[in-house]
Structure formats: structure tokens, C-alpha cells
Amino acid sequence: MPSRFNFRIVKKEQESLIHQWIDQDHIKKWLHGKGLLNLLHDLKASFEDVSWGKHWIAYENEIPFAYLVTSEIEEETITLDLFICDINYLGKGLSLQLIQEFLINHFADKKIVIIDPEATNTRAIHVYKKVGFQIVEEFIANWHPVPHLKMSLNMKDLKLKLKN
């Protein structure tokens, strides 16, 4: 798959950029409270190689514009969180291709990808369904006690979709 975007692990010197990004209203709407604190703690831990997740920045033409976090929950299963952070990239229809490229280029060896948007985040849910994620269940998250959707993507299905 030819790549429009590239993805790199967040470096310590980019920590302030991540903080600026997640302090924006369009991010704070979905990332706050205990979930935000957990993420910030893990971001800091990632610079010492003791984090539960991997923190990534997505670039288009070397311009950073999105923040992604992955974690391995089983040998063949990862979780994904992502945010389009640069407001100049919002509403451009990039998320579908961004997710596809990221997963194919970095996690093609995995079987399942899990994502868990708030149930009211209809824009994200719409995009995730276009990628191929399917709703597994609704749950109340311990980090934010409102309904969330557990959505699952079979990587084999994504690979087949992109071949055709």
C-alpha cells in the first residue's frame, strides 16, 4: 500500500507538542479525567521504556498532525486510540486512510485491533465502521463512567478489503 502518511514514536522533545494538542477543545471533549491522567502518565513513562503503550505521531509531508496510542493486550491483539490534533487537518476525510495505513504498515502481523470510542462520538464511530471495525458491546469505562463502544477489527478483513 503506497503511503501518504508516516508514523514515528513520540520523542521526549515532542512531549510539549502532545500537551498542546490534547489541551485543545476538540480533544478535551473526548479525553479528560482519569483517562487523560492515565495517558499523560504513560506518555511520560514511555520516555523511560516502562509504559504500557506506544505513543505515535502521524505526519503528512513531515508535518505532524495526529496522535496515536497503541497497546498490546494479548500477543495478537492491540488497542488503538487516535486523535487528529492539528485543526487544519480536521474534517478533511483523512482518518480512514490514516487508520488503514497505520495498521497495515505497523500491525499487519496482529489479528485483532480494538478501539473504544464514547457511544456519543458518532463521527469517530462512522469512520471506524468504514475502516471495518464492528461493534462488539457497549460498556461503561472505569476511566470515564459514560457509555463506550468496544469495536473490533479483524486485520485479515482489512487486508482483504485493501487488496480489492
Image: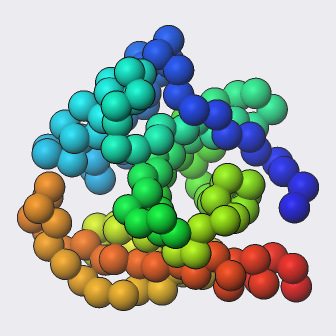
Residue drawn at x 24%, y 83% as measured from the top left: 138
Which image quarter holds the C terminus?
bottom right
Q: Is residue 111 above or below residue 22?
A: below
Residue furthest to the front in view is 75
Residue drawn at x 46%, y 51% as measured from the top left: 70
**Where in the figure is residue 67, as x and y percent of width and height?**
51, 40
Image side of residue 128 versus residue 60, left or right: left
Q: Nearer the viewer, residue 22 or 38?
A: 38
Q: Is residue 45 above or below residue 31?
A: above
Q: Is residue 33 visible?
A: yes
Q: Nearer the viewer, residue 151 or 65?
A: 151
Residue drawn at x 81%, y 76% as measured from the top left: 162
Image side of residue 7 versus residue 139, left or right: right
Q: Is residue 127 visible?
A: no
Q: How is the image coloured?
A: rainbow
Q: Nearer the viewer, residue 28 or 157?
A: 157
The quadrant in which residue 28 appears is top left
Residue drawn at x 31%, y 77% as measured from the top left: 149
**Where in the figure is residue 87, as x and y percent of width and height?**
54, 38
Which image quarter holds the N terminus?
bottom right
**Where in the figure is residue 150, as x and y percent of width and height?**
34, 77
Q: Is residue 160 above or below residue 31?
A: below
**Where in the figure is residue 21, as x and y percent of width and height?**
42, 31
